[in-house]
Image (cartoon, rainbow, N blue to C red):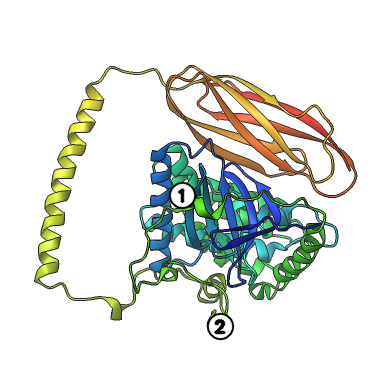
C-alpha cells in the first residue's frame, strides 16, 4: 500500500501517524533525505490568532535554547500555516517515544534499568537547563520523550501546551511529571534488577522535596545498583533496532497519512532570514559527521556531577560604554515594570473576591462499537464545573499499563463543562477489553474523590 502522504513545506509525510492532545503527528522526510516529523495541530486549538502568536514565541524560545547549547530538545525546522491549519516541522524524528517502548511489542526486548536511569538523568539535565532560562516544558509525559537513534533522550512539544492554553511556565509541573515518569519506568523497566526500583523511588521522592538536581545526583550516586556497562546503552540500542524493524514492517499495513494543504497556500510563521542569513543556524542538527561519541548522559555518569550551563570563558566579553548604557536603560525599565506590577497587584487585591474553580461532576465516555485492527480509540472525559476560571489537574489510568498519565488544563470562566481526551492506540492481533479510568486530582472539596471509567472492546 502506498503510504506517502504527499509533500509539504519541503517535507514528505511517510507511513507512521499517531495522535496526542495537540493534534496528529506524522513521520516525515526532508528534501535532503533526513528524517524528521510533522505535527498538524488540532484546528480547534489554534483558531485564535493570539494562540498562534504564543506558539511562535514558544518555537523562537526553543531555538534560542538550542543556540545557547541545550541539546536535549527535538530541534524545530519550521512553523507554518496553510488553509486554516498550523504545522510544526522538526529536524529530527519524533519516534519512538517512551510510550512506544513501554508497549509490549512482539520480538522487541524491554529496555533495562540502566536504560531507564540514563533516560531519566538526561531528561532531568534538559529540564534544569530549560528552567534556568525561565521556561518550562509544561506537559511532559512518556509520549513526548523521544529516544533518538543514538539512544539519547530528547523532549518534544516543549512549551506548546502552555502556549495553546495560555499558561505561564510552571517548573513544578515538570518536576511532578518527572516524578511520575520515574515511578512508571521503575515499574516497567527495573523489575528484573534488584535495588533499581528502590533507587528510582528515592530519586522520585528527592525530586518532590529537593528538586531535579538533587534527584539526578541521587541517580548518579546509585550507579552501583544498575546493570554493568549500562552507560554504553547496549540494551537500549538493541531495543531501538528491533522496534524500528518491527515498525517498518507494520508501516506497509498502515493507511496513508492525510494529504497536507496545497504548497501555494503555505505561510511561514517564523522569522524569514535576511539575504545571506542561514536559516539552519537556528536549528541544532544531531546527525551526520561531527556528532560527539559521548552523549550528555554518558558524560554525566562519567563525571558524576552537574555539567556547567554557563558559556565558556572565552566567549565572555568585557562590558564597554555602550553595554553599560544598555544596562542602565535595562535597570530603569525594570524599575518601571516593577511599579506597574505592584499597581496591578494592588488592583487585583482590591477587587471583589471571586468564587474559586470547583469540579462538581465527571463522566467518561468510550466508543460502544468494537474497535478493529490498528484502532486509535478516543476516550472522552466530561468535567462539570461551577463556571469559574482556574486550573484542573486530572489523571488517566489505562488498564493495560501500571503508570498513569497526569495532566493540567486551564479552564476559562463562564463555562460549566470541560472536555479532556485520552487517545489509546491499539496494535497487534487478538481480542481484549480496555478500560480507561479518569480521576480528578484538584480542585476538589476536602475529603471528596471524583473519578469515573469507561471500557471498549478490541478485536483484530
How many C-alpha atoms fall within 10 Å of the one at disc 2: few (<14), some, or many (≥20)? few
- Marks 2 and 1, how far apart at CA: 30 Å
Q: Which mark is residue 178?
A: none
Q: Nearer the viewer, residue 123 or 92?
A: 92
- Quarter that holds the C terminus: top right
Q: Is residue 404 above or below residue 382?
A: below
- Quarter that holds the N terminus: bottom right
Q: Secondary structure at mark 1?
A: loop
Q: Is residue 23 above or below residue 113?
A: above
How many C-alpha atoms fall within 10 Å of the one at disc 1: few (<14), some, or many (≥20)? many
Q: Quadrant of residue 2?
A: bottom right
Residue designated by label 2:
289
Q: Residue at x 57, y 79 (%)?
A: 288
Name of the residue lying farthest toward the front: 264
- Name the spot of residue 292 as percent of width and height, x first: 54, 80
Viewer-nearest of labels 2 and 1? 2
Q: Quadrant of residue 379?
A: top right
Q: Which mark is residue 159?
A: 1
Q: Quadrant of residue 111?
A: bottom right
Q: Secondary structure at mark 2?
A: loop
Q: Is residue 407 left or right of residue 228?
A: left
Amino acid at each position: 500500500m502506498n503510504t506517502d502522504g504527499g509533500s509539504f513545506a519541503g517535507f514528505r509525510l511517510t507511513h507512521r501517524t499517531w495522535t496526542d492532545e495537540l493534534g496528529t503527528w506524522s513521520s516525515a522526510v526532508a528534501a535532503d533525505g533526513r528524517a524528521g516529523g510533522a505535527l498538524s495541530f488540532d484546528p480547534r486549538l489554534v483558531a485564535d490568532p493570539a494562540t498562534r502568536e504564543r506558539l511562535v514565541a514558544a518555537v523562537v524560545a526553543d531555538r534560542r535554547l538550542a543556540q545557547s547549547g541545550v541539546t536535549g530538545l527535538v530541534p524545530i525546522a519550521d512553523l507554518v500555516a496553510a488553509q486554516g491549519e498550523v504545522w510544526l516541522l522538526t529536524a529530527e524524528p519524533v519516534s519512538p517515544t517512551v510510550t512506544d517502548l513501554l508497549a509490549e511489542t512482539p520480538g522487541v526486548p524491554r529496555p533495562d534499568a540502566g536504560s531507564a536511569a540514563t533516560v531519566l538523568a538526561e531528561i532531568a539535565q534538559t529540564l534544569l537547563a530549560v528552567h534556568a532560562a525561565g521556561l518550562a516544558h509544561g506537559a511532559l509525559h512518556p509520549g513526548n520523550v523521544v529516544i533518538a537513534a543514538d539512544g539519547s533522550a530528547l523532549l518534544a512539544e516543549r512549551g506548546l501546551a502552555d502556549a495553546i492554553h495560555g499558561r505561564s511556565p510552571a517548573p513544578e509541573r515538570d518536576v511532578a511529571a518527572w516524578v511520575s515518569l520515574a515511578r512508571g519506568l521503575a515499574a516497567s523497566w527495573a523489575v528484573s534488577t534488584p535495588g533499581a526500583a528502590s533507587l528510582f523511588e528515592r530519586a522520585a521522592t528527592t525530586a518532590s522535596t529537593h528538586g531535579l538536581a538533587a534527584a539526578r545526583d541521587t541517580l548518579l550516586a546509585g550507579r552501583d545498583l544498575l546493570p554493568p556497562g549500562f552507560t554504553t546503552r547496549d540494551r537500549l540500542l538493541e531495543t531501538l533496532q528491533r522496534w524500528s524493524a518491527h515498525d517498518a514492517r507494520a508501516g506497509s499495513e498502515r493507511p496513508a497519512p492525510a494529504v497536507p494543504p496545497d504548497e501555494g497556500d503555505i505561510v511561514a510563521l517564523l522569522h524569514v532570514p535576511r539575504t545571506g542569513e542561514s536559516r539552519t543556524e537556528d536549528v541544532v542538527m544531531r546527525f551526520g559527521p561531527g556528532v560527539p561519541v559521548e552523549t550528555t548522559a554518558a558524560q554525566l555518569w562519567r563525571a558524576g556531577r552537574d555539567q556547567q550551563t554557563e558559556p565558556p570563558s572565552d566567549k565572555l566579553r568585557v562590558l564597554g560604554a555602550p553595554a553599560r548604557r544598555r544596562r542602565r536603560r535595562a535597570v530603569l525599565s525594570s524599575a518601571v515594570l516593577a511599579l506597574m506590577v505592584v499597581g496591578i497587584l494592588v488592583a487585583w487585591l482590591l477587587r471583589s473576591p471571586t468564587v474559586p474553580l470547583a469540579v462538581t461532576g465527571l463522566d467518561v465516555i468510550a466508543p460502544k462499537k468494537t474497535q478493529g485492527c490498528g484502532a486509535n480509540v478516543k476516550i472522552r472525559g466530561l468535567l462539570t464545573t461551577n463556571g469559574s476560571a482556574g486550573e484542573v489537574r486530572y489523571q488517566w489510568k489505562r488498564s493495560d499499563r501500571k503508570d498513569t498519565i497526569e495532566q493540567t488544563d486551564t479552564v476559562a470562566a463562564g463555562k460549566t463543562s470541560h472536555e479532556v481526551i485520552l487517545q489509546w492506540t491499539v496494535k497487534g492481533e487478538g481480542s481484549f477489553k480496555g478500560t480507561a479510568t479518569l480521576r480528578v486530582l484538584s480542585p476538589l472539596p476536602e475529603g471528596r474523590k471524583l473519578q469515573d471509567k469507561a471500557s471498549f472492546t478490541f478485536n483484530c
